[in-house]
Image (tube, rainbow, N blue to C red):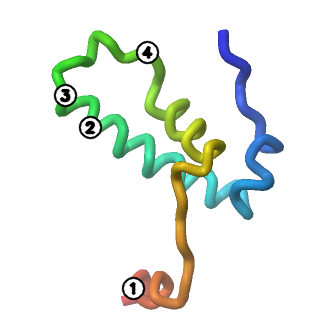
């Protein structure tokens, strides 16, 4: 059984726990949707949430922040 992840594993990757949850959840949704569209669901080896967290650890998933995000959100 794989080792569970802890918050300390991600402290050098993302600046806050809240941002980690948002980034990983969005990526997990993307993975789940792409797997649902494919017909190889029987070959799925790991959950989309685990895959998303592994991608965050491997620096395959990024995020950006900026004034544009805040302005778009407030409109």
Chain-order first, disc 4 or disc 2: 2
Q: Position of residue 16 (x, y in %)?
A: 72, 61
Q: Secondary structure at mark 2?
A: helix
Whether label 2 touches label 3, CB < 8 Å: yes
State which quadrant residue 30 falls in.
top left
Whether label 4 touches label 3, CB < 8 Å: no
Measure the C-alpha gap from mark 3 to mark 1: 33 Å
Q: Residue furthest right?
A: 8
Whether label 3 touches label 1, CB < 8 Å: no
Could you say which disc has been placed on residue 34 in the image? Answer: 2
Measure the C-alpha gap from mark 2 to mark 3: 6 Å
Could you say which disc has been placed on residue 72 in the image? Answer: 1
Q: Mark 3 highlights which residue?
A: 38
Taking the spot 44% from the left edge, 41% from the top edge, the residue there is: 28
Chain-order first, disc 1 or disc 4: 4
Q: Nearer the viewer, residue 30 or 22?
A: 30
Chain-order first, disc 4 or disc 3: 3
Q: Secondary structure at mark 1?
A: helix
Q: Which quadrant: the C terminus?
A: bottom left
Measure the C-alpha gap from mark 2 to mark 1: 27 Å
Label 2 crowd (10 A; few <14 / some 14-19 / many >=20): few
Q: Mark 4 highlights which residue?
A: 45
On the picture, is 11 further left or further right than 23? right
Taking the spot 51% from the left edge, 40% from the top edge, the residue there is: 52
Measure the C-alpha gap from mark 4 to mark 3: 14 Å
Label 1 crowd (10 A; few <14 / some 14-19 / many >=20): few
Nearer to us of marks 1 and 4 is 4
Nearer to us of marks 2 and 1 is 2
Whether label 4 touches label 2, CB < 8 Å: no
Measure the C-alpha gap from mark 1 to mark 4: 37 Å
Taking the spot 73% from the left edge, 63% from the top edge, the residue there is: 15
């Amino acid at each position: 059984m794989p080792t569970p992840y802890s918050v300390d594993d991600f402290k050098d990757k993302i600046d806050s726990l809240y941002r980690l949850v948002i980034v990983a959840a969005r990526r997990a949704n993307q993975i789940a949707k792409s797997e649902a569209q494919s017909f190889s669901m029987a070959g799925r080896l790991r959950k989309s949430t685990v895959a998303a967290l592994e991608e965050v650890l491997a620096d395959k998933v990024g995020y950006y922040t900026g004034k544009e995000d805040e302005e778009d959100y407030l409109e």
